Amino acid sequence: MEYLQQSFSVRFEYKTFFTSGLFELSNTGFNDFIAADSTSASIKKILFVVDQDVLKANPKLADQIRRYFSIHKAAQLIPEIIAMPGGELIKNDEGFFSRVLQIINQYNIDRHSYVAAIGGGSILDMVGYAAAVAHRGVKHIRIPTTVLSQNDSGVGVKNSINYFGKKNFLGTFVPPVAVFNDDQFLLTLSDRDYRSGIAEAIKVSLIKDAAFFEWLEANADALVARDMPTMKYLIKRCAELHLNHIAGLDPFEKGSSRPLDFGHWSAHKLEQLTNFKVLHGEAVAMGIALDTVYSNLSGRISVDEANRVVNLIKKIGFEITHPLLEVTGDDSPILIGLQEFREHLGGELTIMLLERIGVGIEVHEMDAQLIKKAGEILKNEHAALSAV
Amino acid sequence: MEYLQQSFSVRFEYKTFFTSGLFELSNTGFNDFIAADSTSASIKKILFVVDQDVLKANPKLADQIRRYFSIHKAAQLIPEIIAMPGGELIKNDEGFFSRVLQIINQYNIDRHSYVAAIGGGSILDMVGYAAAVAHRGVKHIRIPTTVLSQNDSGVGVKNSINYFGKKNFLGTFVPPVAVFNDDQFLLTLSDRDYRSGIAEAIKVSLIKDAAFFEWLEANADALVARDMPTMKYLIKRCAELHLNHIAGLDPFEKGSSRPLDFGHWSAHKLEQLTNFKVLHGEAVAMGIALDTVYSNLSGRISVDEANRVVNLIKKIGFEITHPLLEVTGDDSPILIGLQEFREHLGGELTIMLLERIGVGIEVHEMDAQLIKKAGEILKNEHAALSAV
Ligand SMILES: NC(=O)c1ccc[n+]([C@@H]2O[C@H](COP(=O)([O-])OP(=O)(O)OC[C@H]3O[C@@H](n4cnc5c(N)ncnc54)[C@H](O)[C@@H]3O)[C@@H](O)[C@H]2O)c1
Ligand SMILES: NC(=O)c1ccc[n+]([C@@H]2O[C@H](COP(=O)([O-])OP(=O)(O)OC[C@H]3O[C@@H](n4cnc5c(N)ncnc54)[C@H](O)[C@@H]3O)[C@@H](O)[C@H]2O)c1
Ligand SMILES: [Zn+2]
Ligand SMILES: [Zn+2]
């Protein structure tokens, strides 16, 4: 058949900034970014959508933002600061997504203007999706306020909302124009949300960087004690490993390989089954424990190393398993979750396991009996693992 | 401020095929494409969404598709062929978009499977948008059935629906995995729809390719007589010019420059004001006439060349102006449209005018008095132009 060949490359560039007190008047970094990010002579407007809990925890934030832009004028602030609830709810109820679109329309935010989101991964995912599709893409700035979003979700290229009761059913691959990680936001996080984000650091260390895993082991106590310099290092290194991975072979995930989803296949099912009462990071921690013990049982990672992984997860304060992860029969939810994941991937399963700490390996089959056994070992406080 | 720099490139490749009788059993091109387009060992499903008018004009099409995939098995056909109305309606009513999402969900179409759309630019835009956001992007195949979609909209990288009464308010830049232009579909087009697509060929010739403009002048009679080899050449050359432009500097239109929107600023307003009773190509033809005469009045293209442009537009059978394009005062719809377009671009206007045939030039201001005068000249059958 006769044809014309189309081929072109699109370059994507953005910075993840690290700062403290982003909207203090003396901190000109945000304004400097906008001043430098000029693509035309147009007036640049900026709209803020902020996580309600972040506003509650920082009652002066809205006024601080308004004062900042009254002095620093690279962008014209839309004076109404939009407050919306955080958490998974905001991705489940399409009404919030529609409202962001409606506000973008109302304030005539165009392709040279900015929609900034301040909050956890949930609100960033939802606002990022709205920004990606309005006018085929207005500029999106992310200001993540949780450990998880500062070290993982906020620095990546994906956005989404849930639909038909399915996690992330709608979304796009569209990078933000900039990410601003401000450590001050972390001070007001609950212990659970603070801890939850550490799971992604354990995950990425296990598949990418053994030295970082050792650092996590050595610094577990400081992390539990919420020592700030320790957390700042964790976030920066974890963000860097995620960014490097994205910039690698397949930024927009065209293939089936998803190494960054290590530990996630069971975690997604568990979040959904508990209606998101188990947090993403908590579920990922249990998923990592499961897939690590499974890796050992299926002849990969050593008993010693597997024990180190499970011990680190416990030391950080995570549960290592959940009743809904138990295999009691062929119709156990976790096996159904595996089947759903296979279908989601289009028939061929691809799951990351551990060869050793810092080195992952992909497999295309999982053995139900070994999943069952791994669950039992974890249920018994992984005492049995050493005996295997 | 400390930062991590992210930068990567994403390569996009797709072919625009030219064929006759795409789903005839002996034509293996479509099946060959899918067989070669393997990214994993997964089963590849294919779902078809088809323009109702195309089905009406080709009553055997659905059965033909089912027979084709019963013999050629690179993809597993979803036996239900989804029929939906064509025309702008399908982009205006969000219900059609939601229904495509619902069907993608119902049939478990995943990121390794295909959603093919057969129809005019409207249904391709809507289905393309649904495919781009479901699961953050399932594979989309375009089978354009109008002159306009075969030579312009169908071969490009944009998709969209209308929202808040605004044309293309929602959408993305996501290329299809393939485009199949089948000339047999053109046989059943109404004369109006057939003619309408020729406007984009005139447009692209004027800003990119003087030789193609001369070819259009020489072949105007054959085009009006619907001579097929002539139309096939027009479509291929026009598609090629569009594809080359997209592959150029700014595929995802990050800047303000939109040379392919020559003649479109007034056309978009006219379509909207007439509730899409004036077709896109008809409005573009009038928009080209207006901006050509304006180009002459503002000291650019010569009288002779401007007359050639307007004469070609008339010869193809287009109207050259419309009462709603007249400037009678400061609040004339066309001037309001110009203001809206300026706001849409973020404050700085960028409009393509003609230096001469084949060579465009961008300006950032338009003079209301000259727009008024250009409209009057066209209203008087551009008789006055020669006298300027
Ligand atoms: N896009 C991606 O690549 C990606 C990757 C991983 C996870 N995610 C998504 O991220 C979401 C989870 O994000 P999350 O863990 O950041 O949780 P979250 O956004 O749901 O926030 C958790 C809670 O903390 C509150 N909160 C946020 N910041 C606060 C602060 N500084 N002080 C006090 N309270 C604060 C929120 O209001 C919410 O109640 C999930 O939907 C997950 O799917 C996306
Ligand atoms: N995405 C882009 O880059 C881009 C570019 C230009 C235009 N567009 C969009 O394309 C749309 C216009 O597309 P169009 O001009 O193809 O019109 P259309 O899709 O609205 O179709 C016009 C009419 O022709 C009918 N039809 C289609 N194919 C037929 C056939 N083979 N036989 C008989 N009837 C047939 C349709 O049912 C409809 O009634 C507009 O919404 C416009 O905004 C998009
Ligand atoms: Zn995660
Ligand atoms: Zn057009």
Image (spheres, coloured by chain):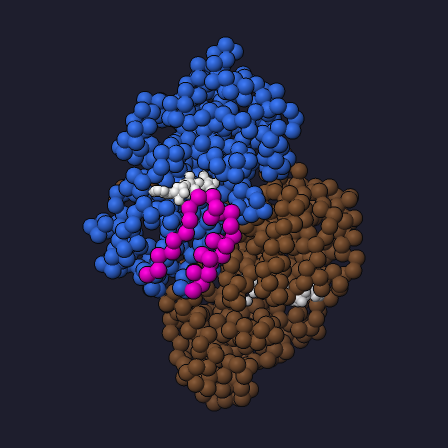
Chain colours: A brown, B blue
Give residue A208's position: percent from left, percent from top: 50, 65
Tell me the magenta residue range. B79-106
Residue B36 sits in quarter? bottom left
- Foreground residue, B130 or A311? B130
Could one spot residue A237 in this view of the protein?
no
In the image, farthest residue toward the left: B26
- Foreground residue, B364 or A287? B364
Q: Is residue A296 left or right of residue A156?
A: left
Q: Residue at x 25, y 60 (%)?
A: B70
Give residue B381's position: percent from left, percent from top: 47, 18
Residue B239, above or below A49: above
Q: Is residue A64 left or right of residue A251?
A: right
Residue A147, above or below B287: below
Give residue B116's position: percent from left, percent from top: 37, 52
Q: Residue at x 46, y 86 (%)?
A: A328
- Foreground residue, A335 or B182? B182
Residue B217 lies in the magenta-colored region: no
